[in-house]
Amino acid sequence: MDVIWLLEQWVERQPDKTFVVWAPFEGAERHWSYAEMAGYAKQFASGLHARGVRAGDFVLIHSDNSPYFLTAWFGCAYVGAVPVTINTRSVADNVKYFAEVMEPVCAIAQPGYAKMVREACGEDTKLIVTGEPITGDEVKGLEFESFADIFSNDSLPALPTDPERNFAVQFTSGTTSRPKPTVWTNANALWGGKSMAMNMRLRREDVTLISMPLFHANAQITLLTALWSGGSVVVHPKFSASRFWNTCAKHGVTWVSMIPFAFKALKGRPVPKHNVRIMMGLERLPEAEKEFGVQTMALWGMTETVASSIVTDPDHPGPAGTMGRPSPLYGVEVRKKDGSQAGPGEEGLLFIHGERGVSLFKEYYKHPEETQKAFDENGALDTGDVVRIDENGWMYFVNRDKDMLRVGGENVAAREIEIAINDSGLVMESAVVAQKHYMLGDVPAAFISLNEAGKVLTEEEVKNKVMALCREELADFKVPRSVHIVNDFPRSTLDRIAKNKLRDQLPSIESD
């Protein structure tokens, strides 16, 4: 089995049922049945094949939520190519790195990103630009083909069904200086869709709303979950608190995958009559259940686990704040620092057992050492998260043992920001920590000590130069909210900077 096998199953069984609704903030909605989406994807795949794209080739997609994204994503699957979906908030240096690692034979970009993608990929990579008409300074002087010109009615060569064939790549932040390309197989994609549909007991009648970015694992698993259950998907360009409930009511949405920011943004807004049954999030939120008239379902997972390895049950939601209990579909361990198993009331590091390429990601592409480090000697995935277990087996998130921040749903490596700061030539040492934010959860805050070059400048000049460099080298959500100059850093054992003490100096941001 593979993803195309699954889509074709539904084309055969319910060809005319609505699969995707594109609900833009301006302009008319568009609807595609299962048969129509499969048909467009196959025509796009045929066009890719005519341009030399083959099974196993990488195709970079740099696009916000749109029908183009969905067509390209499924089109790649039909030809056996592997879509590499990248964060549209990435700066040019990030995109260049992604292209250097993946060496895509083809890139698909919306007009605003086309020049950046062309410069990153080079002239040998075929560039396809979405939108119609495609004119103006955004694409002036570029050699490209229009998305609309790719479609072809030529027949595609038969592609053998292969669950082990690579399906998708997403770059995930880690504690290293650069995001890592996480590879999902077709088996991973099917596992993710099936297990999430089972967790929520979804049926063909169910409808979901995707307003999270389609380049992200959250939205892709949501899409695959709807596909597994034969349901329908409504897609927004991005999350909009003012439009959320009206869209849910209009389209009969029954379940939604959320991030903490979205829950907070909806708080206090009018809630019309709706059919939403389940809101998925990182923890159970009784207050949201009461305000929105829904059930919140906690599901913990990461790109590397594909689906959720810790979940609550629709009939047994658990106490407030819980992230759930271990899913029977995974092996879950909580280990103390000495390697022993954590007991009730104790905290420990979370390890996940599964099968590589099925319930756990296949690999970090071209990063064999990082792939090896991700697993222990028994093949368990080291998540880097610290959790606590209560006397009834419910688990609670405590913090991240690895040096990571969670900024509005995005994982951010502190080390990546520190490297950018150190490139300023003004800094002796730097330390980036999480500052609590009322909407985003975490935001980066930087502490720096100055070298001789930095000491000849005023503090304001140093801060301005550091911030300007960060804006140039980092995606906007990774740029520090503040820079603090210190003479000395607090130290822990082995002379390491005691980041916990730096975090304690920062007040929570309660408003912008």
Image (tube, grey):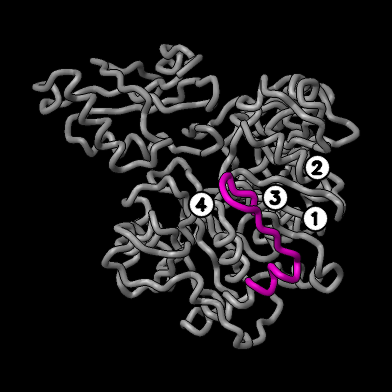
| Residue assigned mark 4 | 64
Residue ID at (57%, 81%): 46
| Residue assigned mark 2 | 254
Give percent across and percent down for residue 430.
Answer: 30, 28
Residue 379 visible at all: no
Q: Where the C terminus falls, by quadrant? A: top left
| Residue assigned mark 3 | 234
| Residue assigned mark 1 | 231
- Mark in front: 1 vs 3: 3
**Marks 4/2: CA–CA distance:** 24 Å
**First in sequence: mark 1 vs mark 4:** 4
**Marks 2/1: CA–CA distance:** 10 Å
Region in magenta: 22-40
Residue ID at (44%, 18%): 503
Q: Where the N terminus falls, by quadrant? A: bottom right
Give percent across and percent down for residue 468.
Answer: 25, 34
